Amino acid sequence: MTGALIVHRSGPSVTVQDLGRPGNMVFGLSPGGAADRHAFIEGTVLLGQSLDCAALEMAGFGGEFEATSDIRIAMTGAPMLARLDGQRLVWNASHTMQAGQRLTIGAASSGIYGYLHIGGGIACPPFLGSRATHLAGGIGKPLCPNEQLPLGPDLKPDFVGQLLSVIDRFSGGTLRVLPSVQTDRFSAATRARFEATRFTRTPRGNRQGAELQFEGEAFVSDAQLTILSETMVAGDIQMTGAGEPFVLLPECQTTGGYPRIGTILPDDLPLVAQAVPGVSLKFRFVTHEEALAHHRPTETLRADLTRKLQPLLRDPRDIRDLLSYQLVSGAITGWD
């Protein structure tokens, strides 16, 4: 019999997420899914389980959880203070959580979206081929206290104590952008100024998109009033009527009429999703050839991460540079 995860308390935006529902744009439903897809994939690697296993996405703050049976857990994405019965847990690692123990996850120290993965995944009923909550589409809702989430069968109960060292996605940086169908409607001077400008996120934003602010004159298209509504995708950078950029995220609308100066590569989109207000973001246009050369499809990324797994507790026999460690710091005499 599989167990359940009891939600004693949770942050205001804790939802069940997987990789979303691709293929439903024609019905007006964007794919949705984890805001930081890399973090979601990292969790499946730490637990050695399928990409179909849903996890909890915690926006800014986690909560307090209990399991009705022994389970494996892993935590990825925006680092948060996690304790199991008061004992601090390592982030980006997998652990054993025994029945009745209390897992508390606090506020994010950097970034926005943290993830709690469980062996076997959250087994709530799928809808349109996914268990992902899509708030903008009216599918699912944030978690509430006293909920019990069913868990799927854990196929690798003994695979635990794994650690991943991951690239920082929480401090901003330069994002690669592909030209969009309306890029040429912005003058060469405007595009050059766009690449040279430093942007930061405003507090206004959610899983649908992120508003950016900057200093200087607006980014105006010469033909922005003649654009008809057309298909939009996550990563598109819309310029509003005021000439301010708005980056679309997984729960974005499926059509829109604002001009798009470009589209952020999927590999770089987590940097926007995880950026808190004040974090610096810049953009750089790339060619399709360059984008393809740097793109890592889901299975490639998963394979790369799997090769980077390390044991959380290292065996001294496997540490090649053991003699470089300080092994006697804090030693005392037998009389102390």
Image (cartoon, rainbow, N blue to C red):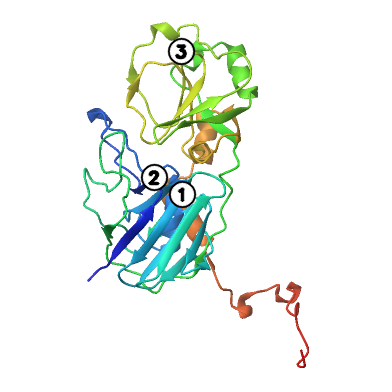
Instruction: Identify the residue at the far bottom of this view.
Output: 335
- The tally of labels here is 3
Q: How far separated are the C-alphas under marks 2 and 1? A: 8 Å
Type of amino acid at the residue the image marks with label 1: Phe
Classify mark 2: residues with Cα within 10 Å, few (<14), some (14-19) or many (20+): some
**Badge 3 element:** loop
Residue 34 visible? The answer is: yes
Q: Which residue is nearer to you in this view: 168 or 60?
A: 60
Q: Quadrant of residue 233?
A: top left
Type of amino acid at the residue the image marks with label 3: Gly
Q: Tell me the residue at 44%/16% (across/down).
A: 259
**Relative to 187, is 7 above or below?**
below
Q: Which residue is mark 2?
A: 12
Q: Which residue is mark 3?
A: 241
Type of amino acid at the residue the image marks with label 2: Pro
**Badge 2 element:** loop
Q: Which residue is nearer to you in this view: 304 or 40?
A: 40
